[in-house]
Image (cartoon, grey):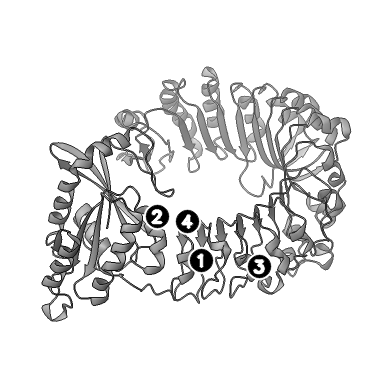
């Protein structure tokens, strides 16, 4: 998205600092002239007034009225188009917020509003917000620890009763005295998502009126359990996230709510968390009684749960009996539990697909052999688990698609069935990792590899540093860098070229030269219309490996693919040359390939290579055009737009 900035040169020292996002380019001049008190306007190329953000955080007390007037004329002309509005008006500019809301209410077209208010101004602003009866989503947030100094009264929150079209509501304040009034909940019968961060007691009985509710998130709220009739009214509730009030945190396992979970027929996701600050002593450590106990029986008996997140204060997992949590597909455990992983949790979770055990420092020593029984597991997170090797039970998992091994002490990978279907692998922050693991060759579907912050990693191996990436950079962007960055898997660049009076968009894929990536890159040969085989004229081994690459291409690429042989780094001193021109030409003649010697550094013959390769590709132009009319094959991790005429080629 194109973004720019228009400054207003003649602003006073106490200038208003307001930001309106997603302003179309043709309105830049008008905005600059109209809003003379704005310091800057951030602009994008979006053509519709979809979203507007107004930030008056640094407005002075005297600026409010004038700003409202200048802003009003701008908004008035665009009320029909504005759908989403974010408004932040700290005290004492709450009157400005009221004026803006009144103006938005005059058109009553707004779909969603995020209102960040001051402690003092919110009760008065609720009356203005009630005029926005078109709203389907409303967020009211008070900065700080849940609006630490603000206590709303039930009669204040009752002002929002006219918002009968609400589908999603989020409210963050310190306290709601008197709770949510029943008439208000009746008015919100269409509500599908309710998220409240506040201190108050909420009777389960009051939820019977929210018959459309699908998501309920309560942070700091004391919720009494719903009885059977209320649970029947909540038959559509699929997600419940609960952080008990601070006074209830130490005895959260005893909450009466847990046995009532079985009465919620559609409940599929439960996130149970605890406010750790409320459990800490003066010395900053958790009290001994705060981490006692395990998972409440009421949670284990909830047979329809599919996703479960447990709080960090638990000290043990009970033995899981057959028939408990039979539908569970996703589980996130705190580190204190992951280090005490009972074998029964491996044997009796047949549907488990996703598991997060991050932070368990001794997991590598504690993982039972039975862990390999989780044969359907597809997503596994083992970050910061102190691993020095991939545990054998993990390596035996046949269905893994995504594996996070970041922040460990791995020096390599282990062989095993887990590599066969792996698509995403994170090895970030493994300081003992010195080379790319050779085991990656057994991961043919790997599309994403994260090696960030592996400080000891040295990238070397066959056919590396021959200059393929530099050749591509010179051709596509006419630039050169001497900095060496090894290609990990696949990279690509796109350049438009003119062939027979028609523009062709070349998609040029830069493959990793390392042997361990050969099984990855060979999968990308299908459908390629041209391939460059590049060696380094100063490196005999890279030249010798051309025959291996040819065998790989013949096995995986189309028989009609256009190929060329390129000896790179021809600018190097002749004393360093290991492969004479005549040997390169002889090998090219053997395979009936065009031959070039190039230098990405001096730009010698670079354009000639691609020009010569494009001409033999012209017979395939019709094929490329037909491909553009239908969904074309492309790597899962690339996002490309099909042009009217396109060719894909490799280096």
Residue position marked by numbered label 4 in the rendering:
445
Mark nearer the N terminus (4 vs 3): 3
Alpha carbon of mark 3 to alpha carbon of mark 1: how far? 18 Å
Number of marks in picture:
4
Residue at 43 percent across and 41 percent down: it is 17
Choose between 21 and 576: the one closer to the eye.
Answer: 576
Residue 273 percent location from the top left of the image? 73, 53
Quadrant assignment for the N terminus: top left
Residue at 18 percent across and 67 percent down: it is 587
249 left or right of 584 in image: right
Q: Are marks 4 and 2 in contact (CB under 8 Å)?
A: yes
**Which disc number belongs to residue 224?**
none
Mark nearer the N terminus (4 vs 2): 4
Q: Pointer 1: residues within 10 angstroms few (<14), some, or many (20+)?
A: many
Q: Quadrant of residue 184?
A: top right
Q: Is residue 563 visible?
A: yes
Q: Quadrant of residue 127?
A: top right
Residue position marked by numbered label 1 in the rendering:
427
Quadrant assignment for the C terminus: bottom left
SS assignment at label 2: helix
Residue 625 percent location from the top left of the image? 27, 35
Mark nearer the N terminus (4 vs 1): 1
**Which disc number belongs to residue 393?**
3
Alpha carbon of mark 4 to alpha carbon of mark 3: how far? 21 Å
Mark nearer the N terminus (3 vs 1): 3
Alpha carbon of mark 4 to alpha carbon of mark 2: how far? 8 Å
Residue position marked by numbered label 2 in the rendering:
523
Residue at 39 percent across and 75 percent down: it is 458
């Amino acid at each position: 998205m194109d973004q720019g900035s228009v400054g207003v040169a003649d602003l006073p020292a106490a200038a208003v600092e307001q930001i309106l996002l997603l302003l179309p380019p043709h309105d830049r001049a008008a905005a600059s002239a109209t809003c003379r008190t704005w310091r800057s306007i951030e602009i994008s190329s979006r053509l519709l007034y979809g979203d507007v953000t107004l930030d008056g955080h640094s407005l002075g007390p005297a600026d409010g009225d004038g700003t409202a007037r200048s802003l009003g004329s701008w908004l008035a002309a665009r009320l029909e188009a504005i759908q989403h509005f974010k408004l932040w008006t700290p005290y004492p500019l709450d009157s400005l917020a009221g004026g803006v809301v009144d103006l938005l209410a005059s058109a009553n077209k707004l779909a969603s509003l995020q209102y960040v208010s001051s402690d003092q101004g919110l009760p008065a602003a609720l009356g203005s917000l009630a005029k926005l009866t078109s709203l389907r989503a409303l967020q009211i947030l008070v900065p700080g620890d849940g609006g630490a100094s603000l206590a709303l009264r039930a009669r204040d929150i009752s002002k929002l009763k006219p918002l009968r079209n609400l589908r999603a509501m989020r409210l963050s304040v310190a306290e709601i005295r008197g709770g949510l009034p029943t008439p208000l909940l009746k008015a919100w019968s269409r509500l599908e998502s309710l998220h409240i961060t506040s201190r108050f007691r909420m009777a389960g009985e009051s939820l019977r009126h929210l018959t459309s509710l699908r998501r309920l998130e309560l942070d700091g709220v004391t919720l009494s359990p719903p009885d059977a009739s209320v649970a029947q009214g909540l038959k559509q509730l699929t997600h419940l996230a609960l952080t008990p009030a601070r006074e209830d945190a130490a005895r959260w396992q005893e909450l009466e709510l847990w046995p009532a979970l079985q009465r919620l027929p559609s409940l599929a996701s439960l996130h149970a968390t605890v406010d750790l600050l409320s459990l800490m002593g003066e010395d900053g450590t958790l009290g001994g009684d705060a981490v006692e106990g395990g998972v409440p029986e009421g949670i284990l008996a909830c047979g329809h749960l599919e996703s479960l997140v447990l709080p960090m204060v638990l000290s043990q997992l009970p033995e899981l009996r057959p028939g408990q949590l039979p539908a569970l597909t996703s589980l996130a455990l705190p580190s204190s539990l992951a280090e005490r992983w009972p074998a029964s949790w491996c044997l009796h979770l047949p549907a488990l697909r996703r598991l997060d055990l991050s932070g368990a420092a001794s997991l590598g020593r504690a993982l039972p052999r039975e862990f390999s029984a989780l044969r359907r597991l597809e997503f596994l997170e083992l970050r910061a688990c102190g691993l020095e090797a991939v545990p054998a039970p993990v390596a035996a998992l046949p269905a893994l698609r995504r594996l996070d091994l970041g922040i460990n002490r791995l020096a390599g990978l282990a062989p095993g069935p887990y590599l066969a279907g792996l698509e995403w692998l994170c090895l970030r922050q493994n300081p003992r990792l010195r080379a790319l693991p050779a085991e990656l060759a057994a991961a043919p579907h790997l599309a994403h590899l994260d090696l960030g912050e592996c400080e000891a990693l040295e990238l070397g191996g066959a056919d590396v540093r021959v200059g393929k990436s530099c050749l591509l950079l010179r051709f596509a962007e006419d630039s050169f860098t001497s900095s060496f960055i090894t290609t990990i898997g696949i990279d690509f660049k796109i350049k438009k070229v003119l062939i027979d009076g028609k523009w062709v968009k070349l998609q040029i894929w830069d493959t990793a030269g390392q042997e361990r990536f050969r099984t990855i890159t060979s999968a990308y040969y299908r459908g390629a219309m041209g391939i460059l085989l590049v060696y380094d004229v100063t490196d005999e081994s890279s030249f010798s490996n051309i025959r291996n690459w040819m065998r790989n291409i013949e096995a995986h690429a189309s028989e009609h693919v256009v190929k060329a042989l390129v000896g790179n780094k021809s600018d190097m001193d002749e004393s360093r040359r290991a492969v004479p021109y005549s040997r390169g030409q002889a090998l090219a003649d053997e395979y009936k390939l065009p031959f070039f010697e190039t230098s990405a550094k001096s730009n010698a013959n670079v354009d000639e290579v691609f020009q010569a390769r494009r001409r033999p590709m012209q017979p395939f132009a019709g094929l490329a055009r037909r491909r553009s009319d239908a969904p074309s094959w492309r790597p899962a991790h690339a996002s490309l737009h099909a042009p009217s005429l396109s060719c894909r080629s490799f280096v």
